[in-house]
Amino acid sequence: MRHIAIIGSGPAGYYTAEAAIKAFGDDVTIDIIDRLPVPYGLIRFGVAPDHQAIKNVARRFETTALNDNVHFCGNISVGKDISVEELQQLYDAVVLATGAPNDRPLDIPNSDLSGVIGSAAFVGWYNGHPDFANLAPPLSGKHVAIIGNGNVALDVARILAKTREEFATSDITENALLALTDSSVESITLLGRRGPHQIAMTPKELAELGHLERAIPIVDPDDLPEPILDSMLEPGIRKSVTHLRNFAQIAATQDSHKPVRIAFDFYASPVKFGGDGKVESLTIERTKLDSDLRSIGTGETYDIPCDLAISCIGYRTPPIDNVPYEHGRGRFASNDGRILPGLYCVGWARRGPSGTIGTNRPDGFAIVERMIEDNIGTSRKTGRAGLNSLMANRKVEIVTFRDWKNIDKLEVEHARQGAPREKITNAEEMIAARKG
Ligand code: NAP
């Protein structure tokens, strides 16, 4: 029997488990270990609450989770409750599928002012992540600056702009919903350090900004390159740029009366925050592109008012003691997923935060291919039995998948009308809810 431990119960973790079952059949046990008492990582805590169709992939993961050879082991913090070396003594293969939950730091002066936050915190807050449920972002000011031109920046802008009705079928927490619908935000500026052709926003997600009840997207037509140049773009980005071109017309239409404005500011790089105790302004430098399409400063600066700043500039995988790590790229150091003999990484922990949820499927299958090539197992390691006894000795209560189903049931029972669930946002309450 092969024993595999997967650390992290998000998409990369569950796709790896699915691949391992396909490859090894009944000759494998798979323990999916998570720091939190609830599964699904990015699906639960990263995907926007109003994107329920994307969250539905959890149903596929549940099929894997219910396989007799797969066990969810929640509430175990690797690095604290158990080390990677200890896991390697218990399992034939250990796979780090820990994602990239930490913000890439925005290294500009005064980033430590109150009201300057990263997307991990803000997204975690509206998605009820126990680490951020009490964030209370300041929403009493009019002006929000969002730094970055990727899909997370879009999520954050849209969530800030929606009405209570637009969240009706979402699983946003009631706490975040109350704060957002009581907010005074009127102007949201999306800062891109490069131009419209360099955005990392996908068309479907970008198009949503054009259909909001109380907000309109604003694009300055002068920022748009000559239309003929769009033909050189890859089709997805070309479609996104077409949306930007449409947005450039909106200000002149009947939608222009909507009270919230989401303005794209291209060729704009943040330089420093200003404010006394809390953020009040942001200084921006106008940029241009060099011949390699990198942004370079022009020396021209200007200030915008800013009551809340949210940097959406990418994520990093937190390092784990004694596991080789690429500091520059913020991910584990690996050779195509192989870190050390018997130790692997997969998903964002391997390749950095890029791609869609589905990108993790081939990633999961590829890492299991590596295990087959490396001839992992079958050894006399103890797998789950050893984990159980070690955790019992250390007084760590393992939360099982059956426990999760009890938590899930309670969340569904407490949902607002029309919503799929009301999330429990506190780890102790999750643990208390697990016996139903
Ligand atoms: P991302 O796609 O890498 O975008 C990061 C953005 O931040 C880029 O526009 C980048 O600009 C900018 N940036 C980086 N460093 C900066 C700095 N120092 N100053 C100013 N701007 C800076 O990252 P993401 O938005 O966090 O998304 C992560 C992954 O999740 C992506 O693959 C994304 O597609 C995916 N995602 C998908 C969805 C969805 O499908 N619905 C939703 C959310 C996230 P440069 O290009 O100039 O570096």
Image (tube, rainbow, N blue to C red):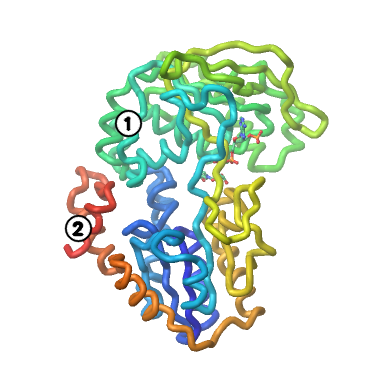
Pick the front one: 413 or 271: 271
For disc 2, the neighbor class at 10 Å (few under 14, some 14 to 19, many from 20) is few
- Report if residue 279 is visible in the image: yes
Q: Tell me the amino acid under the disc marked 2.
A: Ala
Quadrant hosting ligand 1: top right
Image spot of residue 2 (x, y percent): 50, 83
Work out whether residue 151 or residue 208 is closer to the camera in this orientation and state it.
151
Query: Which element carries disc 2, helix, strand or loop?
Result: helix
Displayed quadrant of residue 314: top right
In the rendered structure, the answer to whether residue 259 lies left or right of residue 15 reads left
Q: Which residue is mark 1?
A: 136
Q: Say if 369 sits above or below 295 in the image.
A: below
Q: Does residue 210 lie above or below 366 as drawn?
A: above
Residue ID for mark 2: 432
Amino acid type at mark 1? Ala
User: Does the beta carbon at disc 1 come under 8 Å from ligand 1?
Assistant: no
- Determine whether the residue tagged by mark 1 lies in a helix, strand or loop: loop
Q: Is residue 38 left or right of residue 121?
A: left
Q: Which mark is residue 206?
A: none
Residue at image coords 45%, 22%: 144
